Image (cartoon, helix red, strand yellow):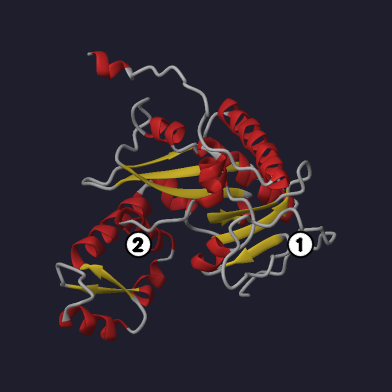
Amino acid sequence: MNALTPIPTPEPDHSSAMDILPPSPPVPVPKPGLYDRIPEDQYHASPGVSVSRLKIFAKAPAKARYGQNKETDSLRFGSLIHTAVLEPAELDLRYMVTDLERFDPRTGDFKEEILKAKGRELVKRAEYEEALRIQDAVHAHPSAGALLRGDLRVEQSFYWIDPETGLLCRGRADSLRMELHAIVDLKSAADASPDPRGFAKSCGEYKYHWQDAYYREGIEAVTGWQPEAFVFIAVEKERPYLVATYELEPAAIERGREDVHEQLRLYAKCLKDDYWPGYSGEIEPLAMPSWAYA
C-alpha cells in the first residue's frame, strides 16, 4: 500500500469494526493511521465507516447495508475538477482529451480513443477546458489560492477507531495544510454565495457539518494534532466561476459532532444485532412541502 508511515497505536480488535459490505476479494483491514494517495477505488472498497455511509444510514439503516456507490456524470466531472485544482501536474497523466461527442463502447472511434488513452480516462474537450477555467478561478482567489500553496498534502486517507463504539472509521481529505493544521475541502456548487439559499443551503442539505466534525476527530486521532480549521473552497460550475471560502460556525460543528456520534452508536447496534431496518412499519402522517400549497 502506498502510504505514509502510520502513527503507532495499540493494535485494536477489528472484529466488530468491519464494513458490512466486504469487497470481493477482501481488502485487508488497514491499521489506524494517515495514508498518502491510496487509489480512490481501493479506499472506497476498504473496511470502515465513512461519513458518507453514515449519511446514508441516517436515511434508513437498510440503505447502508445494501446500498452501493454509483458513478454519475456529475461525480466524474467533480473528480476532473479536483484533479485540475488540487493536482494540476497529474491532469494529463490521468485524463486524455477527446473530440468524441458520444462515449459509445460499441463504436470503432471510441475503441480507437481508448487504445490511444493507454489507461487514462477519456474526457470531452469542453469539460476539460471548463475544468481549466475553474482551476484558474480557484487559484486566482486570494484565500483559496493561498490555501493551496505551502505544505499541501492531497488525497489523504485516514483510519481510526471510535473509542465509544469500537468501530473502525475512515475519511479521505481533499487536502491537508500540515503546517497550518488545517483541512481544506473543495466543493463545486451551483451557488457558492453565503446566501441561505446558496452554499449555506448545500451545507445543510449535504450535511457538510457532519464531514467537518468527523474529519476533525479522525485527523486528531491519527496525527496527534487538533485541526485548527476546516476550510471549504466553494466554486461555481458555470461562468464566471465565482469562488468563496468558508468555515462553519462552532454551533454547526458541535451539532455535526453530536449527530455523527448518535449515528455511530446506532450503527454499532445494527452491526451487533445484524438488524438493518428500512422505513417505518406503521402508517405515518405525511405533510406536503409548503410550495405544494402555493
Q: What residue would you read off at disc 1? A: 7
Q: 130 above or below 279?
A: below
Q: Is residue 238 rendered to the left or right of residue 148?
A: left
Image quadrant in which the N terminus is located: bottom right
Q: Position of residue 14 (x, y in %)?
A: 76, 58
Which residue is farthest right? 10
Question: Along the polypeptide, which appears first: circle 2 or circle 1?
Answer: 1
Q: How many marks?
A: 2
For the point 61% across and 39% down, the residue is 213
Give x and y (percent) for residue 76: 34, 60
Picture quadrant where residue 37 is located: bottom right
User: Is residue 84 or residue 114 the one in the foreground?
Assistant: 114
The amino acid at mark 1 is Ile
Q: Nearer the viewer, residue 152 or 250?
A: 250
Locate residue 21, reporting x and y percent: 58, 58
Circle 2/circle 1 CB separation < 8 Å:
no
Q: Which mark is residue 80?
A: 2
**Separation of marks 2 and 1 at Cα, in angstroms:** 31 Å
| In the image: residue 63, left or right of residue 137 | right
- Tell me the residue at 63%/30% (across/down): 254
Tell me if I can see residue 153 in this picture.
no
